């Protein structure tokens, strides 16, 4: 494509009052080498007349458009010109709203921004989507419980082919094993028949759903749109091609054998799962002698919220025990159900059920720390508890004790096994071999043929749940196109799991639709660019494959990377990692950003600070500060980057060798509670940055001249001050000694 | 603290619910009630623990405790309860059940607490007076004697036999029954809290009386602020009416001496001057009683939303006090007006006073004895340090 440029400057929203537009145009002609007749201005560029000005030029052949107006984060519909390469230069927020009007410094700043915008389009190219051949839009659901069934039905009803894989002989999971369900509708006082059987019937007869029972996923290869999944059933295998996955593998009850202190082992101490079986059979009778239980004690948080067992709340056990208390009361009017709890947690409308159950005179509740369950003779038991309002230390006799057992996600065992394997691997091949031989291998769920491991990655602080850890995108796992839902993601009740399933189904549909259009799945869901490495120059250092947060890059036996582009989220972490600087996007590359840095006007009498700002949080935060008309030093040049993880160290050299006095990397918080959209971009940038000190020392530059700052989008009110303080500090250090060279 | 065995009692839970504590089970033990309560001690405060104990049916724990009586049902707790559990009302119901538990004979308490037996209980004094009036022949041909055409109740029903004897007997019965009741209560508290009492009973009693006379605890109520004033009016008018009764009785002693022929020469009018003292006291007290009880009623209606209206048990007592005051005043005015309607009004007054006296150990009237006992006990066991 031969580029035909057009530069359009808006004078609205105060830009015309802040900047001398004539001077700006003249400088752009000189500085960015654009012909004067291609630079146009308009009083309100986003008005129909202003837009017509641009469209008219497009009709005449203009295909590369630089718009000097407001932030690219606004008016994106107005300034969307399909087929043209468009660059938005943020003259409104970064100049007009944050600078003193009509000063020399403000003028230079506007000229630099416009020049950088022109250079970006000169170096960049119009993206062409990379649509891989033979894509499938089918969806595979792993797990046939309430979550998996709901997800399968949602996707199937939306018109997508679904393969539902269930390892048991029948569909339904835990919900098919229940005697009754907690109320689902107002006034939340009647137990309901399990709803799952309707869903099983619907799924089994649905034309878009293929049900595979007694089946497991033996192997998963490929990438979104192109997963080849081997399903094994009773020794025979078949391969299915799907576009996306929903993992609804569910949960297992916590191992009650570990709850000896709560009396487990005594036949009359049972789990809530066993209680469902009892209730299904008829009267609540105790296992030891078949006597009808009249004093049933429920112990909440059996394993849950206990640092020695499961540190988290399992979410639905309170409602389950209240429901089972109703079994006790409905089956025998003179029986009492005694519930010992830490706190009753009944989320959402379940609270109404709690209130209703409270009102039953025979449902007795007390806050308590249960310390022991001991034998009281004749098969009876004593529940011993501390810190109750019935007394400091109490003992209550019961004829049956039910432990409200906690939730362990199905993903936990494989994650723990794999973590152990990694640890053993660090000690050498012998240790690894010994581990494999001694530790029983648990059931894997996905068996991914990924360099980064066969299952969803274990996330710190998620206790084995396949949770996303993305604060804004809860269904996203760190494997693109694979979505978790239900109790495998978080402990939740069946209503919540059904909603979760619908959400995950929508995400899976989004995934197959995006890869069909050759655009990123998430979170840059509009992005048609993709990393395009010049592999001929690759030195097989494997940094890109190691650092990709999403396992998108495999490598061959020689260590040369191969991109599974549909797994890629376009963060540019590989671009930042590459020491050979061979990874580029059409509109974002080491050269483009480097050239923009080099385009900054260097003045011996003035200071220049470049801010590389994360597009996801830091950049919008600066826009917000601008809306509040907070002042930012005119020495500062802000350049957006997709993620701080895309920061290539050569930019530091570019900046300081050009004569820039200071450099800020402005990105997300990392470490625990990280906020990075791409998991560890800012953390990687920090790691790389720590190496910069040596380089700066070599150049005889003060390392204080560059700094990484962690900010959140909500820090907009602090960011201008942080930047201005940094500029002041750089001024104290003095000008970059390279300036004069 | 030693381990306590907790034995839930479903029957007792239902009893509390049926006795006016129907909101009992709504409590979820958040402790807002104990935090907003101004009259609870800081250590192991009420009413949350009472709520939990009642939810589990721990009768002995509740009854063997002065705390249920330290509560004055300000209803601050009820007003602030986030679940509508109305601890004030529930504790009221528990107090009622505790009186039922301790009072002798127990069946009378059950009758007093139940609207079903109201007519039966009323019938006792009514039939008694109908019989007396019939025996005088007033229903037949005999005219009610007057004094120079003016109505004198003493001529209608000779007070020595038909008032003083009957009421002294009723009062003695009540005092004896109350004594038995509080003795049981005291023992129950001793059993539940062994070896906690220190200090002298005498000083505890006197401190408690000072406390009660000043209504010091009552004044700490916030939501039902006016209740202390209303209760004080009723309380002091009862004292005034008690003094009136004693003086009126003293006045007629010479007459009784003469009538019983102990000393026939006695000047039967020698103490008539006492009337100049007790009549004003009596009338002022009666007026105060009416104002007080009307305030009690209006407070109940006013605070209905926040504090609850109250149970049958509460309203029986309120109505009785109001009825005694009203019939008493009316009987006086009608007598002065010299109309024949004075007689039935007077009889109604006597019947209501009988009701108040004879059933005092079982009705809410008993609260004055049980609460005083509990306050003394609380002081002795360090549960109540006064009004610091």
Image (cartoon, helix red, strand yellow):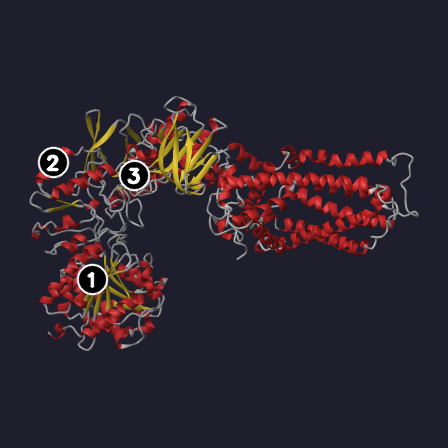
Q: Check the residue under mark 3 and report the chain it is in.
A: A
Q: Earlier in the sequence, mark 2 or mark 1?
A: 1
Q: How many residues crowd around disc 1 within 10 Å: few (fewer than 14), some, or many (20 or more)?
A: many
Mark 1 falls within which chain? Answer: A
Q: Which mark is residue A120?
A: 1
Whether the residues at callouts 3 and 2 have beta carbons within 8 Å, the answer is no
Q: Which label belongs to residue B165?
A: none
Task: Have a look at marks 1 and 3 and say if they share a chain.
Answer: yes
Q: Nearer the viewer, residue A503 or A289?
A: A289
Q: Nearer the viewer, mark 1 or mark 3?
A: 3
For the residues beneath circles 2 and 1, the answer to whether they share a chain is yes
Direction from residue A106 to residue A563 in the image, left or right: left
The answer to whether any part of residue B341 appears in the image is: no
Q: Label 2 is found on which chain of the structure?
A: A
Please give the residue where the numbered disc 3 appears in the rendered image. A488
Answer yes or no: are tags 3 and 2 on the same subunit. Answer: yes
Residue B215 appears left or right of B128 = left
């Amino acid at each position: 494509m031969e580029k035909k440029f057009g530069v359009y400057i808006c004078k609205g929203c105060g830009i015309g009052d802040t900047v001398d537009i004539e001077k700006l145009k003249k400088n752009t002609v000189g500085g960015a080498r654009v012909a004067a007749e291609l630079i146009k201005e308009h009083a309100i560029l986003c008005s129909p007349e202003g837009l017509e000005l641009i469209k008219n030029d497009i009709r005449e052949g203009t295909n590369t458009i630089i718009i000097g107006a407001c932030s690219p984060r606004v008016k994106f519909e107005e300034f969307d010109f399909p087929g043209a390469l468009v660059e938005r230069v943020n003259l409104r927020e970064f100049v007009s709203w944050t600078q003193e009007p009509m000063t020399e410094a403000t003028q230079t700043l506007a000229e630099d921004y416009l020049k950088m915008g022109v250079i970006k389009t000169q170096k960049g190219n119009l993206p062409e989507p990379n649509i891989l051949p033979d894509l499938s839009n089918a969806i595979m659901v792993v797990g046939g419980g309430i979550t998996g069934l709901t997800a399968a039905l949602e996707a199937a009803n939306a018109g997508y082919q679904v393969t539902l894989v269930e390892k048991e002989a029948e569909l339904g999971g835990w919900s098919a094993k229940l005697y009754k369900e907690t109320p689902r509708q107002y006034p939340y006082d009647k137990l309901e028949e399990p709803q799952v059987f309707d869903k099983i019937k619907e799924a089994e007869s649905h034309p878009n759903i293929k049900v595979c029972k007694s089946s497991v996923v033996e192997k998963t290869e490929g990438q979104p749109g192109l997963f080849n999944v081997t399903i094994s059933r009773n020794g025979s295998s078949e391969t299915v091609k799907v576009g996306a996955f929903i993992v609804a593998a569910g949960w297992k009850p916590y191992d009650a054998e570990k709850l000896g202190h709560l009396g487990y082992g005594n036949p009359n101490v049972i789990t809530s799962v066993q209680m469902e079986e009892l209730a299904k059979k008829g009267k609540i009778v105790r296992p030891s002698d078949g006597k009808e239980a009249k004093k049933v004690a429920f112990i909440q948080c059996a394993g849950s919220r206990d640092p020695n067992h499961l540190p988290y709340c399992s979410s639905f056990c309170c409602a389950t025990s209240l429901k089972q208390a109703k079994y006790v009361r409905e089956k025998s009017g003179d029986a009492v159900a005694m519930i010992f709890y830490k706190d009753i947690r009944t989320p959402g409308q379940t609270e109404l059920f709690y209130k209703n159950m409270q009102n039953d005179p025979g449902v007795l509740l007390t806050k308590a720390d249960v310390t022991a369950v001991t034998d009281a003779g004749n098969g009876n038991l004593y529940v011993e508890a501390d810190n109750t309002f019935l007394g400091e230390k109490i003992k209550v006799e019961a004829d049956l004790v039910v432990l409200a057992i906690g939730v362990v996600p199905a993903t936990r065992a494989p994650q723990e096994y794999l973590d152990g394997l990694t640890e053993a691997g660090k000690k050498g091949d012998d240790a690894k071999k010994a581990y494999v031989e001694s530790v029983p291998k648990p059931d894997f769920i996905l068996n991914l043929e990924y360099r980064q491991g066969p299952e969803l990655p274990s996330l710190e602080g998620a206790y084995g749940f396949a949770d996303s850890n993305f604060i804004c995108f809860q269904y996203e796992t760190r494997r693109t196109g694979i979505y978790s839902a239900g109790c495998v993601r978080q402990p939740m009740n069946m209503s919540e799991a059904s909603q979760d399933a619908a959400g995950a189904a929508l995400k899976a549909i989004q995934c197959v639709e995006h890869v069909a259009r050759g655009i990123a799945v998430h979170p840059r869901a509009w992005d048609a660019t993709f990393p395009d490495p010049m592999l001929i120059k690759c030195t097989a250092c494997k940094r890109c494959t190691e650092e990709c947060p999403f396992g998108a890059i495999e490598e061959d036996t020689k260590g040369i990377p191969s991109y599974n582009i549909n797994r890629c989220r376009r963060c540019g972490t590989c671009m930042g990692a590459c020491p050979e600087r061979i990874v580029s996007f059409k509109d974002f590359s080491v050269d483009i950003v480097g050239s923009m840095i080099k385009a900054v006007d260097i003045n011996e009498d003035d200071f220049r600070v470049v801010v590389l700002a994360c597009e996801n949080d830091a950049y919008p935060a600066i826009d917000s500060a601008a809306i509040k008309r907070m002042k930012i030093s005119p020495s500062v040049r802000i350049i957006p980057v997709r993620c701080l993880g895309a920061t290539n160290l050569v930019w530091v050299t570019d900046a300081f060798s050009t004569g820039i006095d200071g450099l800020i990397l402005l990105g997300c918080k990392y470490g625990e509670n990280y906020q990075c959209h791409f998991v560890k971009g800012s953390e990687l940038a920090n790691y790389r940055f720590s190496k910069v000190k040596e380089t700066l020392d070599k150049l005889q530059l003060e390392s204080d001249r560059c700094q990484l700052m962690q900010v959140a989008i909500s820090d907009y009110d602090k960011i201008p001050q942080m930047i201005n303080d940094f500029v002041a500090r750089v001024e104290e250090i003095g000008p970059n000694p390279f300036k004069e060279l | 603290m030693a381990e306590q065995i907790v034995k839930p009692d479903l029957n007792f839970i239902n009893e509390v619910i049926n006795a006016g504590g129907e909101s009992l089970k709504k409590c979820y033990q958040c402790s807002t009630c104990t935090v907003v309560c101004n009259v609870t001690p800081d250590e192991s405060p009420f009413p949350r623990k009472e709520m939990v104990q009642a939810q589990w049916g721990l009768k002995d724990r509740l009854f063997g405790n002065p705390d249920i009586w330290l509560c004055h049902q300000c209803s601050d707790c009820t007003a602030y309860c986030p679940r509508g559990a109305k601890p004030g009302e529930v504790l009221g119901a528990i107090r009622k059940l505790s009186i039922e538990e301790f009072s002798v004979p127990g069946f009378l308490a059950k009758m007093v607490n139940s609207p079903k037996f109201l007519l039966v209980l009323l019938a006792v004094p009514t039939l008694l007076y109908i019989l007396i009036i019939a025996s005088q022949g007033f229903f037949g041909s005999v005219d009610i004697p007057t004094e120079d055409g003016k109505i004198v109740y003493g001529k209608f029903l000779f007070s020595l036999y038909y008032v003083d004897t009957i009421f002294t007997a009723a009062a003695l019965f009540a005092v004896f029954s109350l004594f038995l009741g509080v003795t049981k209560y005291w023992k129950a508290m001793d059993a539940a809290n062994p070896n906690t009492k220190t200090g002298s009973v005498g000083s505890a009693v006197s401190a408690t009386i000072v406390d009660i006379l000043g209504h010091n605890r009552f004044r700490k109520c916030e939501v039902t602020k006016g209740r202390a004033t209303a209760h004080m009016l009723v309380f002091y008018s009862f004292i005034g009416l008690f003094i009136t009764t004693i003086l009126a009785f003293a006045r007629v002693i010479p007459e009784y001496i003469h009538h019983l022929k102990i000393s026939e020469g006695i000047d039967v009018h020698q103490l008539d001057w006492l009337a100049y003292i007790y009549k004003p006291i009596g009338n002022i007290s009666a007026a105060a009683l009416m104002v007080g009880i009307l305030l009690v009623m209006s407070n109940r209606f006013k605070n209905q939303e926040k504090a609850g209206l109250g149970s049958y048990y509460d309203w029986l007592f309120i109505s009785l006090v109001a009825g005694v005051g009203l019939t008493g005043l009316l009987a006086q005015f009608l007598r002065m007006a010299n109309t024949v309607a004075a007689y039935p009004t007077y009889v109604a007054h006597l019947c209501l006073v009988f009701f108040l006296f004879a059933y005092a150990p079982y009705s809410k009237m008993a609260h004055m004895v049980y609460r005083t006992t509990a306050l003394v006990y609380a002081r002795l066991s360090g549960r109540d340090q006064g009004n610091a």
